[in-house]
Amino acid sequence: MTQINDLLANNRKWAAEVVQRDPEFFERLSHRQSPKYLWIGCSDSRVPANQIIGLMPGDVFVHRNVANLVVHTDLNCLSVIQYAVEVLGVQHIIVCGHYGCGGVAAALHRHRHGLIDNWLRHIQDTQEKYKAQLVGLSIEHEQHDRLCELNVIEQCINVGQTTIVEDAWARGQDLTVHGWIYDLHDGLLRDLDTDIGSMADLTARLKEKD
Ligand code: CO
């Protein structure tokens, strides 16, 4: 079992290894970051952004919250998107969910955990919206898996509907929103084929949903 002091020891070992491979690494990164990717993922400890996509510090700008939600009035998430798009100029926004998400499960089964139930209410809205296709799934874990996927797709649409992303497309900025899902059982990511790279893509995606 890891103790708190082990973390600091781990850090010294890691930093030394990085410098051994690339002596200028930290010096170079200390001047500026220029990540191409913004990752919006779940806070779940089993889904760490950098490790699962094999990227080093400096390569991906990260926002995580419980159940990878993009809520139109969440100033925290909106600020991250705005800074990533307008200041850092990222070209890709990846919304990454995962099967076995505790937030999705709690929303689906109406488990009460306290304050967080209000946050997870957004997932219940998605469940309600896609009720017809979810009730058609007889097996409980299939409903859960599908709701995890639908939640990612909904959040991709939410990203596309922010003024930040709409303005970026209007300026002609190269920016695509991707929806991915991670499987805890094999460590693999799956692309949900929900790329939105323009206002036309977003409109088509919204029509599809009706
Ligand atoms: Co989760």
Image: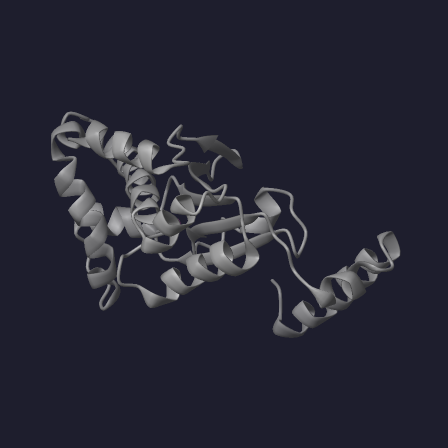
Quadrant where the C terminus sits is: top left
Q: Is residue 166 left or right of residue 73?
A: right
Q: How is the image coloured?
A: one colour
Quadrant where the N terminus sits is: bottom right
Return the x and y of residue 53 as percentages of the image width and height: 59, 42
**Corner quadrant of residue 204:** top left
Q: Residue farthest to the bottom?
A: 5
Q: Is residue 76 left or right of residue 161?
A: right
Observer-nearest of 159 and 189? 159
Q: Judge whether residue 49 can be spotted in this image.
A: yes
Residue at coordinates 35% horizontally, 42% vertically from top-left?
156
Return the x and y of residue 145 as percentages of the image width and height: 31, 34
Return the x and y of residue 113 as percentages of the image width and height: 24, 63
Q: Judge whether residue 141 can be spotted in this image.
A: no
**Corner quadrant of residue 153:** top left
Q: Residue farthest to the front?
A: 171
Observer-nearest of 40 and 137? 40
**Corner quadrant of residue 177:** top left
Residue at coordinates 39% horizontally, 30% vertically from top-left?
192
Observer-nearest of 126 and 196? 196
